[in-house]
Image (cartoon, rainbow, N blue to C red):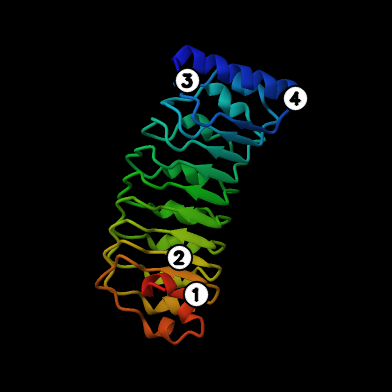
Amino acid sequence: MASGKATDLALEKIREAERDQLRTLDLTGCELSELPPEIGKLTQLRMLELTGNELSALPPELSQLSQLRTLRLDDNRFGCVPAEIFPLCQLRELCLGRLDLARFPVEVSRFRHLERLDLDNNGLSKLPGEIGELALLHTLNLTGNDLAELPVEISGLTRLQELYLGSNRLSALPTEIGRLRQLRVLNLGNNDLASLPTEIGQLSQLQMLYLGGNPDLGIPEEILESRDATRILAHHLGK
């Protein structure tokens, strides 16, 4: 689709959303290279889906969407997190996967109401301590990055229920991971782990632990002795 036609289609959908006072706008896969500034008129919008476009920037008017709760920007060409999203302090879900981010966006720590954060497949090599400030986070997806370690501040995510760390370069986990007492799903597949901290045994709510692709990994007795060990380790044991 030509760039002009893609923009015209997006503008038509924006005007429709404004007329009907829609709370959701889906512009997935529209081949957009720019987002019309009229997006700023949709002050009632709660969810904006922009996945799978060719966006490298966002209009300043986006910051007017003060009611926005979900913003999905996966599969675009930003290279860094657009500053226009930082005023959107009410966000609950933020998806920034597959954007070729050079670094973890420390500014994301401003989103104190955030419950889900996706940063998969970005090549991130470091996770800053500010991640621990997202105290309401229940899902964190860091699959397919270049992380070799986790900061101890991750222990601040006490409401976290799902943590996806598959396909990184992790060789060890901080003992502080045992403080994530609400954790139900922990994906550690395809890393370089040779051992797990015994504090893993403190994760009493854990239901699924993915460990495949760590050929040198030994399983702590604290997990093997759990009454739920068979279910928790099903993926690792190939069952």
List x then y, in percent, for residue 136. Answer: 58, 55
| Residue tagged 3 | 34
Which residue is depicted at the point 50% across and 74% down? 203
Which of 120 and 44 lies nearest the eye of the viewer? 120
For the question of whether residue 37 can be seen, the reply is no
Q: Dot 4, crowdedness within 10 Å: few (<14), some or many (≥20)?
A: few
The residue labelled by disc 2 is: 186
Tell me what residue is drawn at x 30 percent, y 74 percent. Answer: 195
Judging from the image, what secondary structure is the residue with disc 3 in?
A: loop
Q: Amino acid at mark 2?
A: Leu
Whether label 3 touches label 4, CB < 8 Å:
no
The answer to whether residue 116 is above or below residue 15 is: below
Q: Amino acid at mark 4?
A: Asp
Label 1, secondary structure: give it. Answer: loop
Q: Residue at 57% of width from left, 52% of height from top?
A: 115
First of labels 3, 1 by sequence position? 3
Q: Whole-Å distance between the Cαs marked 3 and 1? A: 45 Å
Q: Which residue has dot 1 on it?
A: 203
N-terminal-most mark, 4 or 1: 4
**Is 47 situated above or below 150?**
above
Question: Mark 3 or mark 1: which is in front?
Answer: 3
Check residue 20 in the rendering and tell me which mark sits there, or answer none: 4
Q: Amino acid at mark 1?
A: Leu
